[in-house]
Image (cartoon, rainbow, N blue to C red):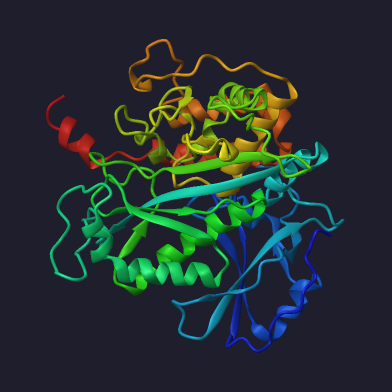
Amino acid sequence: MNSTSRSFDSSLNTEYVYVAAGDINGLLRGKRIPFSQIDKVEKGGIRLPLSILSVDIWGADVIDSSQTNGDIDAIALPTGRAPYPITTTNKPSSMLPVWLYTEDNKPYYGDTRHVLDFISKKFKALGLTPVMATELEFYLVDYTEGQTPKSPIRPKNGLRLNKTSILSINDLLQFDEFLDEVYTQCRNLDIPVDAALAENGCGQFEINMIHVDDPLKAADDAVLFKQVVKSVATRMGLTATFMAKPFGLQSGNGFHVHCSLLDQDGNNIFDDGTDEGSDMLRHAVAGLIQTMSDCTLLFAPHVNSYRRFAPGTLAPNNISWGYENRTAAVRIPGGDSKARRIEHRVSGADANPYLVCSAVLAGILYGIENKLEAPEPINSIAYSELKLKNLPLDWLSAIRKFERSEVVGSLFPAEMIELLIAVKKQEAIRFAKQVTNLEYLTYLQDV
């Protein structure tokens, strides 16, 4: 089994451990065990139903899925990441990340961490090492269930935020206690946090990660980072949301992924000493361009995700690439050529980090292996380029595109594909049955 053998620190001030794996939507599911039983996890003695990773966003079983095997158990093994403290429980508790294996010790590809491992190993076979970093945007909001979220109250002066203030130092200073605690928790968890900034939205922030040469760690860090932000916000009387578009008239929350590739000697194969980058860079870009439409469901997995693709908001809505062009779906940042890399800007912060990183790497690999040629880069505002093809701009179109795609079937394990389609179809049916209050206000008496 692909588990990291380790001894758990019995000196931790912990009474309970939450054994958790990520479901198809990236939400953590599992069970609580006494800390005295934690050694059982390392020995494969903790089991979880395979079906917990195949539920929909509300946690309901998906009837039309491949899980027709009597709801069998899987073996939960540590990912190699140490347990991390949970700060919102009454008793001292920790979370232990696990991933699931079948009874015959094979990876279960309904576990999206295994999907990313599957893609990453293809690079290793070519003698290449992906180096990845993520940037996640989120809103801090004042939220009461059943009501529309409001912008947060500034902790230091007691006034509610009432305007967008991109890169506002004042906003960073007002929320420095929140940011300090997030940074402290992240450092304790070996999450390599870098710069923080106030983003376009009112109460919106972005925190960047430092590049790491392990895609699994990069995705793990993104998952844990979201947990940290939500936990710290809760303790401070706020709600943190990574919804792709929590406010219709404000910027959405993006999840940008940076990636370069190292050869066996540690050289960046995207760098040839020029501003344009190497042929390998353009092959990689071409692969991302050709697979982007079919993989949109992985970047935008929810009905709300498609509200983010609005022109003029720096969220790409077409298939494009360019140098230092933030309106394009794929951006090649400037700077020192040794750091030449790809920035993939399509995904929303609501997406599953394992699937986003998998799709980015799979697209890059597809372009490199097939030596695809990239189209001409876009140097103008990409939204206004009528010649460009749009991404699927609604959820149902993205689901259909993903389901019918031959290239998707060649890139990812069939188990994950079947499961994701079944889950998304079930979610879409439930949303389609909801009649909104706006529809009543608009149509009930007038048509």
Q: Nearer the viewer, residue 438 or 121?
A: 121
Please identify the residue farthest to the front as the structure is shown. Answer: 273
Q: Quadrant of residue 440?
A: top left
Residue at x 38%, y 38% (from the top left corner): 433
Q: Locate residue 266: give its quadrant.
A: top right
Q: Residue at x 66, y 52 (%)?
A: 216
Residue 268 coordinates in the image, percent (x, y):
67, 38
Q: Position of residue 87 (x, y in %)?
A: 46, 77
**Res 231 → quadrant:** bottom left
Q: Closer to the camera, 385 or 339?
A: 339
Left or right: 328 as drawn, with respect to 237: right
In the image, residue 434 lies at what x, y percent? 35, 40
On the rendered structure, is 403 left or right of 438? Answer: right
Give residue 204's position: percent from left, percent from top: 30, 52
Q: Is residue 64 something that shows in the picture? A: no
Q: Is residue 437 above or below residue 328?
A: below
Horizontal side of 390 relative to 38 (left or right) equals left
Q: Nearer the viewer, residue 331 or 244?
A: 331
